[in-house]
Amino acid sequence: MKLHIATVSFLVGSAIVWAAPDLNDTFSSLKSAVEKKDVAAVKTLAPQTAKEADAIMGQADATADVKEFAKGAGEYSEYALSLLAAQGGDDKATIELTELLLAQNPKSKHVDTAAAAYLSALQKQGAAKASAGAQKIVAGRPENEDALYTLASSNGSYATKLVSVMRTKAKPEGVSDADWQKKKDFMTGSGYYFAGINAATRQAWGESDRNLKSAEPLIRGNSQMLGIAYFYLGLANYQMGKLTQDRTKIQAGLKYSQQSAAISGPMQAQANTNVAAMSKELGTGTRAR
């Protein structure tokens, strides 16, 4: 992006200023507003820059240099909106700037820059607002991991898509290897986790088991998620064991349930109940915690 902005600046020569004076003035004002972090001015100037740039791009008699300048100015307007939106600190501004960007170009790569801050701001207004915002993002950026994560908790298809995306997604520019690996592990683990729970609610026990086993090594640092994952692993293995008369599966279900019962969280009480019931069925005499 830095190279592209430099190219745009370089192209603002006398011939281009003469050929596109309005765009040059608006573009220059937008750059100044970005430097000053003037949200109000950027909200006005970015859409204006994009509109003037589009007009020039549609002119049959515009020279290649002028069109290149217009193209760069238009992209800079998207960058400007995403940059100020991603800075956070003012949820209202973050939401307004991102929604201007989504309205201007929902497929813009710069949506990815603003997505996390935008969804975080919407989450404070409720899950429904965040979900609606995430839907807007995936409509134009179907592989945006932040939006997929927001949607994955209530939709197994998005959870599966999140896993698929994170397997092959390249590290974004400007992100360290360590930070990207951390996010990649978290997003992948969360995708498997949500897919596993969704499968359990559908009583797709084998699918639940596979997904939650894949999630387990990636969510070990999150005790609440781990406690819930062990709970559903216990339930899935117990149910598979009952259906196939496989005692080893029921024993695996007991073990996972014991692990869930050992972790403080929303499933601990029910996990204890399950431990007692499974132990009685197996005749092991194991007591719940």
Image (spheres, rainbow, N blue to C red):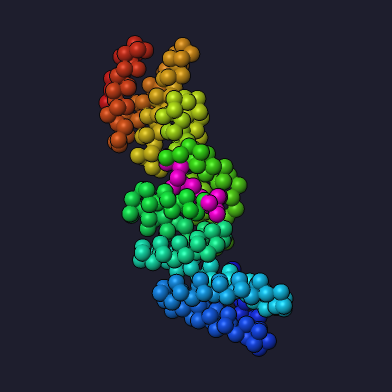
Nearest the viewer among 209 and 41 is 41
Q: Quadrant of the C terminus?
A: top left
Residue occupying the point 55% across, 46% down: 166
To which quarter of the image does residue 109 belong? bottom right
User: Quick check: can you spot residue 288?
Assistant: yes
To which quarter of the image does residue 117 belong? bottom left
Magenta-highlighted residues:
139-153
Please indicate whether residue 139 sits to the left or right of residue 256 in the image. right
Q: Where does residue 151 sit, x and y in percent of width and height? A: 45, 45
Residue occupying the point 59% across, 50% down: 169
Q: Where does residue 178 sit, x and y in percent of width and height? A: 51, 54
Q: Is residue 197 above or below residue 68?
A: above
Q: Is residue 18 above or below residue 158?
A: below
Nearest the viewer among 52 and 150 is 52
Task: Provide the major secondary structure of the magenta segment.
Answer: helix
Q: Is residue 194 above or below residue 208?
A: below
Residue occupying the point 55% across, 54% down: 140
**Residue 10 colored in magenta in the image:** no
**Residue 141 colored in magenta in the image:** yes
Nearest the viewer among 21 and 123 is 21
User: Quick check: can you spot residue 252?
Assistant: no
Q: Where does residue 187 sit, x and y in percent of width and height? A: 48, 46
Q: Where does residue 160 sit, x and y in percent of width and height? A: 52, 39
Please indicate whether residue 43 sits to the left or right of residue 270 in the image. right
